[in-house]
Image (spheres, rainbow, N blue to C red):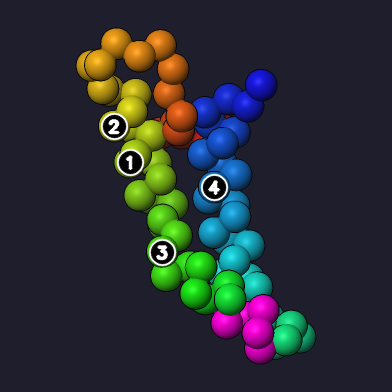
Amino acid sequence: MTMPSERTRAIIQTREFLVDLSRDQALPEAVRTEARRLLRHYPAADEVLLAGKMEEQRGDGLPWVFLSSRID
């Protein structure tokens, strides 16, 4: 079972991977362009962590959270 902190870390690392792809001159232009296109709508690390914090503090009574405010 994936823990919220693992999921949060994976989302943040995916953004870093897309940034790397978008800058890698060894890759075809189409791949770099697609990575840049996806990054336009992809959340930054601080946004993901803030969403996790908001989930942790919500008072709706749900027993689980999808994201975490930490990636340890």
Residue that numbered label 3 is attached to: 41
Range drawn in magenta: 29-33
Q: Are marks 1 and 2 in contact (CB under 8 Å)?
A: yes
Mark closest to the chain's N terminus, 2 or 4: 4
Mark closest to the chain's N terminus, 3 or 2: 3
Tell me which corner region of the image, top left, top right, bottom left or bottom right, holds residue 69.
top left
- Residue at image location 45% in from the left, 60% down from the top: 42
- Residue 35 position within the rendered picture, expressed as x and y whole percent measured from the top left: 58, 72
Mark closest to the chain's N terminus, 3 or 1: 3
Residue that numbered label 2 is attached to: 54
The label number, if any, that marks residue 11 in the structure image = 4
- Residue 64 position within the rendered picture, expressed as x and y whole percent measured from the top left: 44, 17
Residue type pointed to by label 3: His
Mark 2 lies on a secondary structure that is helix
Mark 1 nearby-residue class (10 Å; few <14, some 14–19, many ≥20) = some
Mark closest to the chain's N terminus, 3 or 4: 4
Mark 4 lies on a secondary structure that is helix
- Would you place residue 12 above or below residue 61 in this image? below
